[in-house]
Each structure stands twice: as structure tokens, then as C-alpha cells.
């Protein structure tokens, strides 16, 4: 407790510098305790819409690993708030844990891949991001059947897919959609051309989304609103927000699949 009081009164920027220089375990313990509530906050958001058999304690345990990783890898000199950086790492660690437990059925993974490939095909055909009606027609479904399909996919797929990493073509370097969605301006402007290409494609893909889908991403990843709160803002149901979120992520992933160095993967 004495250590907590000592560090709580210090300027946090200075505290981070001191920790980076000394790796003092007392400072590390203080930072872990200070930001532990952030883990439960992120785990709570991830838990919304997850299957009933998802164990919240598992999410928190995985998220804690992400917090520890964030503390070790945080670079204060990049002028990014630690909370912003940590949320990305915590959420990423939670989804890593979910994937390791293989919580998404193979049939669902296959259906997602099918739709993502279709989105690429339809955008090339029409010259614009396809509408729900165009996608439904291509799947030989009614719009009601398509909306039901998207609702079924929403709770178990689109959020997790954000943490998938994509190679940048440079020395096994990778970048995730989640990092770019959460803080697209946090990258060093001197990043290599290949990495910049991935970042630019994600950014342009977001900009090309229909207005409501773009708003969903902004409100969810930047404003940290829940799907229910976003529905209230947009005047639609929580289920519809979930559908829009799923569709937006699939559109972004379909864009990434067109990057030249991903061909043949």
C-alpha cells in the first residue's frame, strides 16, 4: 500500500520512463493493479453476444496476459495513451485465448470465408461495395434469410476476426485490423511501404463503407459504446447493429484479401 501511495502521486509519464529504465518490479506491480479494472471492462464488452458457455473468468485471465504484455511493450515516447494501447493488447489476448479453445465451429468459419470471397467478387462486378440485397440475391436468399444469417454469424465471428493478423511483406512483420481500427494514427510515419499499404487499404475500406456501418465502427471502437447503446444512437435494434458490424468487418477483410502479397495464401 505504501508503494501504491508513492507511485500514485508521481507523474505517470515519469513513472513509465522510470520503469522502462529500471524494470522495477514494484512499479510493475503498481501498474498491473492500477489497470486491472481495464481487463474486466474489455472482457465484459467481449462477453456481450458470446455463446452462453463462454467463461467470463477465462476472458479475464486471457486479458490479464494482454495487460502484462502491454506493460512490457508500451513505448511512452510514441505519445499514445497507455489505456488506448492496453485495450488493443487486452482484447487481442482474449481473442487469442478464444481461438486456442477453438470456439468457432468449422462450418461457421467456412460460411464466413464464402461470404468474404463473394464480397470481393461482387465489388469487382458492380464497382461499389455490394448492398445487402445484392449479396442476398447472389446467395439465392431472401433479404430476410440473409439478415438472419448475418445475425447468426455476428455473435461468434466478426469481433474475433478483427484480431486476425495480416503479413505486411516485411520480415514476418504483421498488423491486425483491430489495431488499425482502434488507433489508425498511432503508427510511426516512417513505417515501410508494405506496412503502409496495409494500413492505407484498411483506412480506405473503412471510408468506403455505407454511413451506418462506418458509424458502428466509430462508436464501437473509438467511443467504446456497447451494441445496445449504438442501436439507441442510430435508432435501430441491437440485432441490426450486430449485423452492420459483421458486414463491415467482412467488407474490410475482403479488401485485405486483394493485397498482392496475400495472393495464393
Image (cartoon, grey):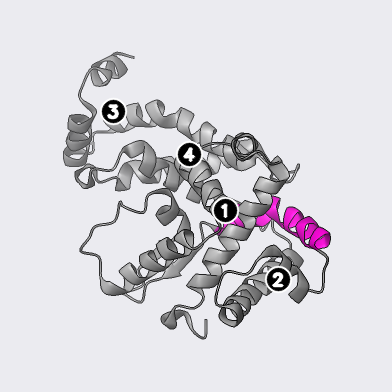
Tags 1 and 3 touching, CB below 8 Å: no
Distance between the alpha carbons at the discs numbered 2 and 4: 43 Å
Q: Residue at x 70, y 47 (%)?
A: 240
Residue 64 is labelled as: 4
Badge nearest the viewer, 4 or 3: 4
Q: Quadrant of residue 237?
A: top right
Answer with mark 4 or mark 3, whichever residue precedes in sequence.
3
Depth check: 22 or 258 in front?
Answer: 258
Q: Is residue 130 above or below residue 212?
A: below
Tags 2 and 3 touching, CB below 8 Å: no
Answer with mark 1 or mark 2, whichever residue precedes in sequence.
2
The magenta span reads: 143-161
Badge nearest the viewer, 1 or 4: 1
Q: Quadrant of residue 172?
A: bottom left
Residue 213 is labelled as: 1
Distance between the alpha carbons at the discs numbered 4 and 3: 17 Å
Report the side of 163 relative to 135 (left or right).
left
Report the side of 154 relative to 171 (left or right).
right
Q: Residue at x 35, y 71 (%)?
A: 197
Distance between the alpha carbons at the discs numbered 1 and 2: 17 Å
Quadrant location of the N terminus in the rendered image: top left
Q: Is 86 in the magenta?
A: no
Mark 4: which secondary structure? Answer: helix
- The residue beneath circle 2 is 134
Residue 182 placed where, x, y %?
42, 49
Residue 61 placed where, x, y %?
54, 39
Mark 3: which secondary structure? Answer: helix
Rate crowding at label 2 as few (under 14), some (14 to 19) or many (20 or more) other CA atoms within 10 Å: some
Residue 26 is labelled as: 3
Give the residue furthest to the bottom.
264
Depth check: 226 or 111 in front?
Answer: 226
Distance between the alpha carbons at the discs numbered 2 and 3: 58 Å
Amino acid at each position: 500500500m505504501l508503494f501504491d501511495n508513492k507511485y500514485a502521486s508521481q507523474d505517470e509519464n515519469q513513472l513509465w520512463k522510470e520503469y522502462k529504465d529500471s524494470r522495477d518490479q514494484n512499479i510493475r506491480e503498481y501498474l498491473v493493479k492500477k489497470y486491472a479494472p481495464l481487463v474486466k471492462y474489455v472482457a465484459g464488452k467481449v462477453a456481450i453476444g458470446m455463446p452462453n458457455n463462454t467463461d467470463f473468468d477465462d476472458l479475464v485471465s486471457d486479458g490479464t496476459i494482454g495487460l502484462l504484455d502491454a506493460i512490457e511493450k508500451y513505448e511512452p515516447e510514441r505519445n499514445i495513451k497507455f489505456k488506448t494501447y492496453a485495450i488493443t493488447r487486452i482484447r487481442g489476448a482474449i481473442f487469442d485465448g478464444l481461438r486456442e479453445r477453438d470456439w468457432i465451429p468449422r462450418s461457421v468459419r467456412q460460411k464466413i470465408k464464402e461470404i468474404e470471397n463473394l464480397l470481393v467478387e461482387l465489388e469487382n462486378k458492380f464497382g461499389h461495395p455490394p448492398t445487402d440485397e445484392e449479396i442476398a440475391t447472389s446467395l439465392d436468399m431472401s433479404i430476410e434469410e440473409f439478415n438472419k444469417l448475418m445475425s447468426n454469424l455476428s455473435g461468434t465471428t466478426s469481433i474475433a476476426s478483427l484480431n486476425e493478423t495480416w503479413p505486411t511483406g516485411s520480415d514476418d512483420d504483421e498488423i491486425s485490423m483491430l489495431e488499425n481500427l482502434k488507433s489508425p494514427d498511432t503508427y510511426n510515419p516512417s513505417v515501410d511501404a508494405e506496412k503502409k499499404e496495409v494500413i492505407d487499404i484498411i483506412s480506405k475500406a473503412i471510408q468506403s463503407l455505407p454511413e451506418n456501418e462506418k458509424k458502428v465502427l466509430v462508436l464501437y471502437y473509438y467511443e467504446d459504446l456497447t451494441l445496445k447503446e449504438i442501436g439507441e444512437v442510430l435508432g435501430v435494434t441491437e440485432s441490426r447493429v450486430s449485423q452492420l458490424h459483421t458486414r463491415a468487418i467482412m467488407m474490410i477483410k475482403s479488401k485485405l484479401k486483394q493485397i498482392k502479397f496475400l495472393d495464393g495464401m
